[in-house]
Amino acid sequence: MAISLDRRHFLALSGASVGALALGACSGPNTSGSTAASSAANGTDWSKVTPASEITFWSNHPGKSADIEAQLIDAYHKSQSETKVTLVTAGATYEDVAQKFQTAQQGGQLPHVVVFSDVWWFRYFLNDSIINLDGVLSFLKVDTSDYVDGLYKDYAYNKLQWAMPYARSTPIFYYNKAMWAAAGLEDRAPKTWQEFATWAPKLKAANPGLQVAHMYAAAADYDSWTLQNKIWGEGGALSNEWTITCDSADVVRTLQFTQDSVYKDKWAGVSAKDVSADFSAGAAASYVGSTGSLVGVLKTAKFDVGVGFLPGGSKATDMVCPTGGAGLGIPKAITPEQQLAAAKFLAFLTLPENTAAFASATGYLPVRKSSDMSAMYAKVPQAKTAVEQLSHTRAQDYARVFLPGGDREIAIANSDILTQQANITDRLAKLKTTLTGIYTSDVKPKLS
Amino acid sequence: MSTKVMTSSTARPDAPPVAAGSRRSARRPPILPTVLGGYLPMLVIVLVVGLPLAWMVLSSFKQVSEVITLHLRVLPQHWSFANYVEAFRTAPFGRFFLNSVLVTAVGATLKVLLAIHTAYALVFVRFPFKNVIFVALLVALMVPPQVAILPNYVLIAGLNGLNTYWGIIVPSLGTAFGTFLLRQAFRSLPISMIEAAEVDGAGHMARLWRMVVPITAPSIATVALVTIVSEWNEYIWPLIITTDPNLMTLPVGLTLLQNNESGPAGYGVMMAGAVIVILPVLVVFTFLQRYIVAGLTAGSTSN
Amino acid sequence: MSAAVPAPRRRRISRRARRDALVFLAMALPNLVLVGAFTYRPLILNIYYSTLNWTLGSPSATVAGLGNYVRFFTSDAAGVVLTTTAVFAVFTVGGSMLLGLLVALSLNTRLPGRTLARASVFAPYVLSGVGVGLVWLFIFDPVYGVFAYVLRQFGLESPRWFNDPTLSLVMVIAVYVWKNLGYCAVVYLAGLQSLPTDILEAASLDGAGRMRRFWYVSLPLLGPTTLFLLITTILSSLQAFDLIKIMTPTSEGTRTLIYEAYVQGFGAYQRAGYSAAISVILFVILITLTIIQIAWVDRKVHYA
């Protein structure tokens, strides 16, 4: 099988490749223009635009919401006959949807309404892929003051509004009431993590089959999201706007506490995959997780499930809860007619009664202040906790939500500390370098 | 046919120590070695392979609280189809199944035909630089698949192939693996036989279909099976190129059952979904493998 | 024994040669065009992308030249990724081929029930990586998994499969070998079944016992099969993706080249140019390995 590649063949092959390269180079990004994201307010005159007759809505049905989404779309069709909405399952995770959305930017059909999570929307903003909504929302006379402030403000940057809240959640503290009672504890969530540290040995002593008093989520299971709560409780933060502060003494102290809880005091563990499943199986007496899982946990667990606010720390006990979940946005590279139709649909989806219906079906939070959730609360009283916690939330740190890959780097660093017993100061210093690098190379050049 | 026997070892890093339990069974064997050397390995193999699959099937009939638990039970307490019902309700699995069947049948058939013809041409038809072409095909095997996703998406979308069956099938039609395997198989055929047919006046197509294909049927069946399997399990490309659920295939559908933040309640349904995806392949495979195995044990004539 | 014929002399292209050329094109061209359009064109484009600093989804990018390659090789990640890939490849290829050969030997029998055994061993190979990953996730889970339950009965704690990077790698390798050894077994079985019996009988008459017969006769004769399996299993091992994605999504212990390329490009980081560079590196490695195998081994393997 000797390959005789003499000069003639070689020239022919290289000729072919150059030709192909020339052909191929037509597709791909533009390398000559500016790379700054455009933060100009959208200047379309909406009064001259008629909404498109068909739009598509890309969703990953967070919280198993496929049914309720279909119902809401039906209701929309009944309420108006201008626009028909097609629901498209664009993936199983936010990452899948993002993948599809990014690929579609290169050529292909873009959706008209697309869902994205807290760590994705800012990238679309940086890529100039979504429009800001202030103009079209005021044209449609949407009452933006009725949206829950914390949830709505999450999508504001540079004084412009870039998305609407949709499937929003906060983490809550889940606990096993039976195990709590066996240990003689008050039927409530701990006020601080330090208080919980005193409860943990009692829990383990009173419940023989228990593996851990508290389970931390796996890295892939949004552990970095709930980590912020612990850090904020100790007065620290992952970042202060764009300045990375993940190696500060407060953060180090926080992680020392959690690392000790696993290795020294041995009352905590780290989940392998899905902490809500570990809890429902009875391996952990408590965990911190999204309220979006509430309905699922109630269905799977064979015991009474208690919920409460997230615990504070030694420096702060209030305003230590992050928000999360997904919002909806409108792509830029579609026609104004489609954008207007999309915005009208968005406004409908987030009407008080509709967001209440969505929240009841999934366990997510209603995004309007005036939503009536009494029916849901009668059925599932635990659902009220997350809503009540909403006025105690604060926006997530930039390092997690605005840096591409930041969330992953933080999760991996946290995992190294909790499962590999890594040296905390060193590991956090390394994290800071990485995060700063991401900011400098991937984000800063695009901010105008 | 050369009968020289090489005494130097081949490229294998370590030659396997022939364990006591793996000797070929001789004719009229004594009982103990037969059981140990013959049946025991077979039993172990069937168990190692079968138990995880059996576990998956059993779990799909359990309620989720029986799966997510510290107290494992082998059999479900109450056999329930709820997971399957839920799976079919959450996603149009019937439609997914049809799509998978269509895409696989068309795609695999075309790929096998392409492989057969290309391999034949590479081995039996005179053409300059055939080796270069073959190497170029081999090199194609080494291109990591995700490299092709973005450019192919742009190309197919530009040709209006989004959400079409041909858009799903065409990009993966170019086949190097099947060509590779069949070329090796064709090369081991005695040239004399083929040349005799040529002298007799048979054209290339006749030679291919009347002589080469029947003899190398087991290899072709192997290529067919591998092609069908990979076509059926193809996941990333159909996910990217379809947005309409009416065109999605089963593996894509399976991942739809996983959901962000739905909590543990989704696992029973996922198991049911996994069974739905795996079962048809197993059935097809059971039928095909009998043919392959029969071909193999009939005493391959590829010498 | 090559069936290739040297290029026809330029002086006189015989009519037969020209006709053959047309037949060749008719038979092979469709396939070649498809491969060219859907595999080679993306490859070339990918090489082009690897010279850019480009965020996926962005309409513009800056030229980086070889910057992405430099960045990869000077990062901490390079050592981890390359080592992990090498370890993964060695153990999956070695494991599948070794176990595959052993299984083939034990299935090369006339005992009843062999059909079921042969069918079963091949079954995992045909199953989708997604489905297989899901099932094994449930078996390995330290809380509600089967292994954990069995170990608990003996008072033991389950290993932290998912949280310890080394154990994650071990777990993924084990599942991969489980899934793929059937492929090696079947190919080896076909090879074993077509070994020329006259040679084996001659050796046996010469007094060679079963071990020597296997070692010095069968194994060398299986050379072409081994080479084919070696090439194809290395290729598929270095491109293994589904299992890793399903079982260890944050890939702390399982950062192989191909998974790293995915995470950097389509995953959390969206660095399309950097990801393309990693894919090119993987491609170069694959070609190099294949050339080495073919060139070096071709001298030693004998086609019977």
Image (cartoon, coloured by chain):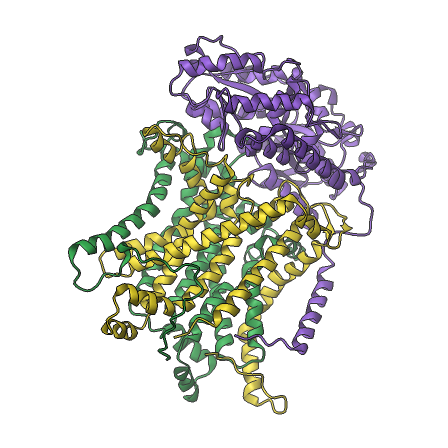
Residue occupying image coordinates x 38% and y 62%: C187
For residue A365, side relative to residue A331 (left or right): left
Asked if A437 appears above or below B9 in the picture, the reply is above
Quarter in which the C terminus of chain C is drawn: bottom left
Q: Which chain is yellow?
A: C
> Quadrant of the rendered structure where residue A17 is?
bottom right
* Residue C301 sits in quarter: bottom left
Relative to residue A184, is residue C212 drawn left or right? left
Residue C96 percent across, percent down from the top left: 41, 54
Q: Total of numbered circles in the picture?
A: 0
Q: Quadrant of residue B28?
A: bottom left
Q: Nearer the viewer, residue B287 or A72?
A: B287
Chain B drawn in what color?
A: green
Q: Is residue A83 above or below residue B187?
A: above
**Residue located at (36% from left, 35% from top):** B61
Residue A128 visible, this angle: no
- The tint of chain A in the picture is purple
Confirm whether residue B111 shows in the render.
yes
Q: Position of residue A80 (x, y in %)?
A: 66, 32
Q: Relative to A395, does residue C218 appear above or below in the rendering?
A: below
Between C216 and B153, the residue placed more toward the observer is C216
Give the position of the N terminus of chain C as an image quadrant: bottom left
Residue C200 image offset from top left, x and y in percent? 28, 71
